[in-house]
Image: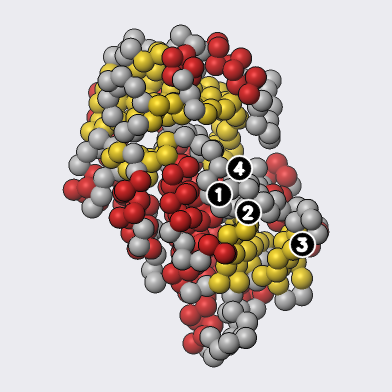
Amino acid sequence: MPQGSRPRLRAIIVGAGIGGLTMAHALHKAGIDFIVVEKHAHVDAPVGGLLVILPGSLRILHQIGLLAGLKAVANKTLPRIVAWDPELQSSIASVSDMHVKHGEHALVVERRKLVSFLYEALPDKSKILTSRPVVGVQHEADGVRVDFPDGLFEKGDLVVGADGVHSVVRSAMWECADMKDLGLMKANDRKTVFQQWKCLWGLAPRKGDIDYGYTIRNCGEGRSAGLITGSDKIGMCLTWKLGSDEMRRETQYTADEAEESAASFSRQLLAEDVVFGDLWSAKERGALLDIEVSCQKRWHHGRIVLVGDAVHCVTIVSGFGGNMCIESAAVLANTLHEAIVVNEERAKDRLSGSELETALRRYQERRLPRALKSCRLAHLFERLQAQDGLWMRLSARFVLPWLFPVLIAWIYSQWVRGSPVLDF
């Protein structure tokens, strides 16, 4: 590109989490200019617990050139998934042969370490702007502007909302859509909601002889638990359905509310000889939050587009969340790269607003079916583990123990097979 010329596309990525930083790496590989704005003072803020990164996502990271480095910071490979019923009868599904079927083991990694690794691996860290909470997004004649509380702003061609469940960009997108299209979609019709759950999660040092792997347990009374063990950390979560008279909170619960909830589960067995209260008392961090298994019906408007938890959200127990963020970033990067290549073949310097919106519509068409399928699968998985309803209770007690070893391995294998890849 000649010196002083305007880049062919400039993306403003809001949120330096897994989705936002994967998006940054993918755009860099595609030769697309970007900046990332993050509300926290540090990218590696102590947020989140342990994640499972499946081979499909590892394939995308390998294409970007990040796999070897990620393996160095990952806690452990995932050898097995163990399901415990309320009577502590276990069923074991081995996933240790994932590398045979898909080329790589599933990796267990702390979210904070993954985000820090993605940040450190960026060639130009000056493109990451911290302490930049977004307060507004405005469309302009030839682009879009992102506003910050101190009066500063950034201008670009596209805003990518990777700012999580409580997305400011998503709210701005709907505000812009309502102003232009006079109520494009009613608020309660903007997403497909499968279920709302309450979740208590924590991260603690690994101690004792707790086996490596991922443990899920039906705890009775509509509750399920998850326990994932890395080389030096243990991630835990308890999940139960919101009552019919409860409203999902948009803000995180206070530390006192989390402690009060944890006290009521202090004697809860997560697995054989593993008590929730013992792990919680030793935790490094943890929180109580409401989770909505949902998928937005519209992923873009004008020059605004959403990725990751801002557009699709699942519970912790399924293990899909971080992987879905990586996948959405890859599909959006593919679509933008394709649109730019077509534009250059027509000897045009830049994408027009209508051409960009066509590309974003194509992104949604390509990604939405798999995202919906993933949300449905995560929803079913959670309901089975919580024995939510008569049919789920009967299935979990009399069918799942026999099918679990084969079914779980097959489900995860099929899910990995359908994972997208970068096509440039």
Is disc 2 placed on a helix, strand or loop? loop
Circle 3: residue type: Leu
Circle 2: residue type: Thr
Foreground: 27 or 389? 27
Mark 1 touching mark 4, by CB under 8 A?
no
Circle 1: residue type: Val
Q: Which residue is mark 4?
A: 165
Residue 153: where, in percent of width, then height?
74, 63
37 left or right, relative to 373: right
Figure check: 276 above or below 373:
above
Mark 4 touching mark 3, by CB under 8 A?
no
Q: Which residue is mark 1?
A: 43
The numbered mark, 4 or 3, whose residue comes first in the sequence reads: 3
The numbered mark, 4 or 2, whose residue comes first in the sequence reads: 2
**Camera-nearest label, 4 or 2:** 2
The numbered mark, 1 or 4, whose residue comes first in the sequence reads: 1
Q: Residue visible at 43% across and 59% down? A: 121
Figure check: 8 above or below 397:
below
Question: Residue 118, located in which quarter of the rendered image?
Answer: bottom left
Circle 4: residue type: Val
Per the model, the C-alpha gap separating discs 3 and 2 is 13 Å
Q: Which residue is mark 2?
A: 130
